[in-house]
Image (cartoon, rainbow, N blue to C red):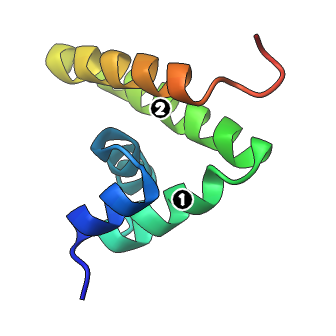
């Protein structure tokens, strides 16, 4: 049986993206990994992931969680370079 780490490595997902899906949906790690992989297959899915990142950043900011907000900004910058918003160059 594959571990969650093996699954992430296999499908080229970074931990932060899976964590964003997990935090946004409250799914298990395995389910969040699968959902993230599915979302990356379509433009609408990539847009949904961008929105999940932005919502989590706004939530951290609203709660005064400065370190989490900064970590999310860094993770989102990496994600946005790897998966640019469709239709935006």
Query: Can you say whether 52 is above or below 63 in the image?
Result: below
26 shown above or below 77: below
**Label whose residue precedes the other's in the sequence (1 or 2):** 1
**Farthest residue toward the right?**
87
Considering every residue shown, the one lying at the far front of the view is: 10
Specify the quadrant of the image occupied by residue 33.
bottom left
Asked whether residue 62 appears in the rendered view, the answer is: no
Residue that lies at the very extreme toward the bottom in this rendered image: 1
Q: Residues within 10 Å of mark 1 (few under 14, many from 20)?
A: some
Residue 31 in the image, given as x and y percentages of width and height: 42, 72
Helix, strand or loop at disc 1? helix
Residue at 38%, 62% in the rendered image? 10
Q: Residue 53 shows which numbered tag?
A: 2
Residue mark closest to the camera, 1 vs 2: 1
Q: Residue 37, percent across and down?
A: 54, 59
**Quadrant where the C terminus is found in the figure:** top right
Residue pictured at 52% horizontal, 27% vertical = 82
Q: 7 or 19: nearer the eye? A: 7
Q: Position of residue 11 (x, y in %)?
A: 45, 59
Question: How far apart, in angstroms, are the residues tagged by discs 1 and 2?
Answer: 15 Å
- Residue behind mark 1: 37
Q: Quadrant of the N terminus?
A: bottom left
Picture mark count: 2
| Callout 2 secondary element | helix
Q: Which sits in the foreground, 5 or 62?
A: 5
Mark yes or no: residue 75 visible. Answer: yes
| Camera-nearest residue between 23 and 80 | 80
> In the image, what residue occupies the spot 25% across and 14% down?
70
- Residue 78 is marked as none
Q: At x 48% / y 68%, what residue is drawn?
A: 34
Q: Vertically, is 54 above or below 40?
A: above
């Amino acid at each position: 049986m594959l571990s969650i780490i093996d699954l992430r490595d296999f499908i080229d997902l970074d931990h932060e993206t899976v964590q964003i899906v997990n935090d946004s949906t409250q799914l298990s790690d395995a389910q969040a990994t699968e959902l993230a992989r599915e979302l990356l297959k379509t433009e609408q899915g990539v847009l949904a992931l961008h929105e999940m990142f932005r919502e989590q950043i706004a939530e951290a900011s609203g709660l005064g969680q400065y370190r989490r907000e900064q970590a999310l900004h860094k993770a989102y910058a990496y994600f946005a370079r790897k998966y640019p918003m469709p239709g935006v160059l």
